[in-house]
Image (cartoon, rainbow, N blue to C red):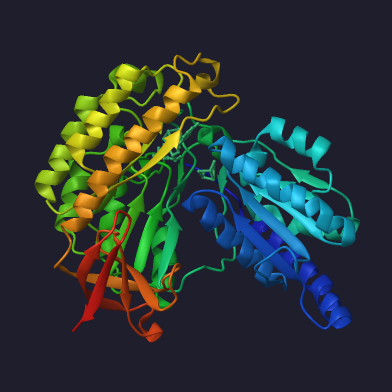
């Protein structure tokens, strides 16, 4: 059983929300406006979901929000540690904020999330970025009211990056980005320790939320008009292993499926080692579970997979994909791939290409390996030069882009049900939405369609998206 943050502690945090409200009311009287907070998210969907909770707490404390640090009284960056470039972006932003803070010393700068759950980063921040006022790790998220109150009222630096296996905190206020679809975390942490990955060190051990808490969150979302639910976990296939009741991820999916008002169910991420027949059956038998599967394979070569500590072979992975395709013929498949794992040779990389060609994913997220301090892979020597790794990365993109375009071409002429998300990011004259299979579709239509399901006839395919026309 996971360790829960008890009600008394959550009430204590609530009392700090009231104290912050008092401070912010005085701010309002003095300045004629509420204090403004700017939040930025650098990581995965779980990180985004955490930001929604941060915004929920800030809103309850009396903050309004702004889009840029320029007007902000409080800046919170929710950071990611998965690759070096995610951390570099944050350092870049902190450099800019240093100058902003020189002209506006009252501005509060806070960093939270996975990056600051690492001791060596906190040490660096203290030395080089002393203008950061508040640092709190992933385990301290629910303590934000207390930490922020201490930062503001005591005008001193606050750091809370306690490391632990992790707890579950329920009932943190939340301000969601979308009113049509919602992230719902079903579990936290990761036990897999893939040799390249920092996540298990910064997110703690796997812990599942109780099903009744998950279902009550979804029921409330549905009452508020949400129709698409995305269940989140680093490895959703482990759901329930730590719970007293006999429940697994497929059982949970069936419970969510039974909620009236839920129209689409997605989930991520599945680890191939625990992905099995029961889940395939559950997906195939449900009208609501989207015909979409994100199943990261990372590398195609068995020796590399072993060094990565992934606990499956290429043949086992391909067999699972074969079964999925057999039971769900129109499945949308995506994956994560790492190029340039330290011990990977050019020849072994060709096995990755072979998996791409054999599976024909609709889309992949490809990454060049990034060394993460404290992980086993950080101790391994590179066999390839940077140039060779970049060449392999380009080969991978070329192969996949051709496949993605070909898969999208097959959609031309089809009529798809699309949940309208809003104006297209690149062209405000167009609406944008997603099919059941998660393809992005752009089409002309009235913005009043946002949040509705419409039928769109696909007229044109690109590598990353589709164009279409509204039909009755
Ligand atoms: N829990 C998820 C993934 C979380 S991290 C899963 O196991 O599928 C998202 C992706 O980042 C991983 O799938 C992997 O492809 C990539 N990644 C993780 N650590 C990395 C590293 N050190 N360098 C490059 N990519 C990495
Ligand atoms: Fe990282 Fe592996 Fe856990 Fe995914 S399963 S978060 S890649 S350690
Ligand atoms: Fe997510 Fe990045 Fe943390 S991928 S779990 S925000 S390290």
Residue at 88% from the left image edge and 60% from the top image edge: 103
* Residue 464 vertical position relative to residue 315 in the rendered view, above or below: below
Foreground residue among 466 and 26: 466
Foreground residue among 407 and 398: 398
In the displayed structure image, the side of residue 259 where residue 222 appears, left or right: right
* Residue 417 vertical position relative to residue 154 in the rendered view, above or below: below
Q: Quadrant of residue 415?
A: bottom left
Residue at 90% from the left image edge and 55% from the top image edge: 155
- Residue 227 picture location, percent across and down: 34, 71
- Confirm whether residue 460 shows in the render: yes
Residue at 40% from the left image edge and 43% from the top image edge: 243
Foreground residue among 177 and 396: 396
Residue at 54% from the left image edge and 24% from the top image edge: 375
- Residue 362 picture location, percent across and down: 25, 49
Q: Quadrant of residue 222?
A: bottom left
- Residue 34 picture location, percent across and down: 76, 77
- Confirm whether residue 227 shows in the render: no
- Residue 432 picture location, percent across and down: 36, 71
């Amino acid at each position: 059983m996971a360790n829960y943050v008890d009600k008394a502690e959550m009430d204590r945090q609530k009392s700090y929300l009231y104290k912050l409200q008092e401070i912010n009311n005085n701010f309002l009287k003095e300045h004629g406006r509420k204090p403004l907070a700017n939040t930025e998210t650098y990581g995965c969907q779980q990180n985004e979901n955490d930001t929604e909770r941060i915004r929920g707490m800030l809103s309850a404390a009396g903050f309004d929000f702004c889009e840029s640090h320029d007007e902000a009284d409080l800046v919170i960056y929710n950071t990611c540690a998965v690759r070096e470039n995610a951390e570099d972006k944050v350092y870049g932003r902190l450099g800019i904020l240093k100058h902003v803070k020189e002209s506006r010393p009252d501005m509060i700068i806070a960093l939270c999330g996975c990056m600051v759950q690492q001791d060596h980063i906190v040490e660096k921040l203290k030395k080089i970025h002393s203008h950061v006022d508040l640092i709190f790790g992933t385990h301290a998220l629910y303590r934000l009211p207390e930490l922020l109150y201490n930062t503001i009222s005591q005008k001193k630096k606050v750091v809370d990056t306690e490391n632990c296996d992790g707890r579950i905190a329920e009932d943190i206020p939340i301000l969601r980005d979308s009113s049509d679809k919602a992230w719902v975390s079903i579990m936290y942490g990761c036990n897999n320790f893939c040799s390249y990955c920092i996540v298990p060190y910064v997110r703690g051990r796997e812990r599942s939320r109780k099903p009744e808490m998950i279902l009550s969150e979804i029921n409330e979302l549905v009452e508020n008009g949400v129709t698409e639910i995305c269940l989140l976990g680093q490895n959703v296939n482990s759901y329930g292993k730590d719970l007293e009741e006999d429940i697994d991820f497929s059982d949970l999916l069936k419970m969510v499926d039974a909620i009236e008002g839920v129209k689409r169910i997605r989930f991520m991420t599945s680890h191939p080692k625990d992905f099995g027949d029961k889940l395939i059956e559950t997906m195939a038998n449900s009208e609501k579970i989207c015909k979409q599967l994100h199943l990261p394979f990372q590398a195609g070569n068995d020796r590399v997979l072993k060094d990565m500590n992934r606990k499956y072979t290429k043949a086992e992975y391909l067999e699972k994909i074969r079964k999925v395709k057999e039971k769900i013929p129109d499945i949308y498949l995506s994956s994560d791939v790492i190029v340039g794992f330290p011990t990977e040779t050019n020849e072994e990389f060709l096995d990755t290409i072979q998996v791409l060609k054999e599976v024909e994913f609709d889309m992949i997220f490809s990454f060049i390996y990034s060394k993460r301090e404290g992980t086993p892979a950080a101790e391994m020597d590179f066999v390839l030069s940077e140039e060779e790794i970049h060449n392999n990365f380009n080969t991978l993109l070329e192969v996949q882009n051709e496949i993605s375009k070909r898969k999208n071409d097959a959609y031309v002429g089809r009529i798809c049900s699309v949940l309208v998300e809003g104006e297209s990011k690149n062209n405000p004259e167009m609406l944008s939405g997603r099919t059941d299979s998660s393809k992005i579709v752009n089409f002309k239509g009235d913005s009043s369609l946002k949040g509705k399901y419409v039928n769109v006839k696909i007229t044109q395919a690109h590598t990353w998206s589709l164009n279409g026309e509204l039909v009755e």
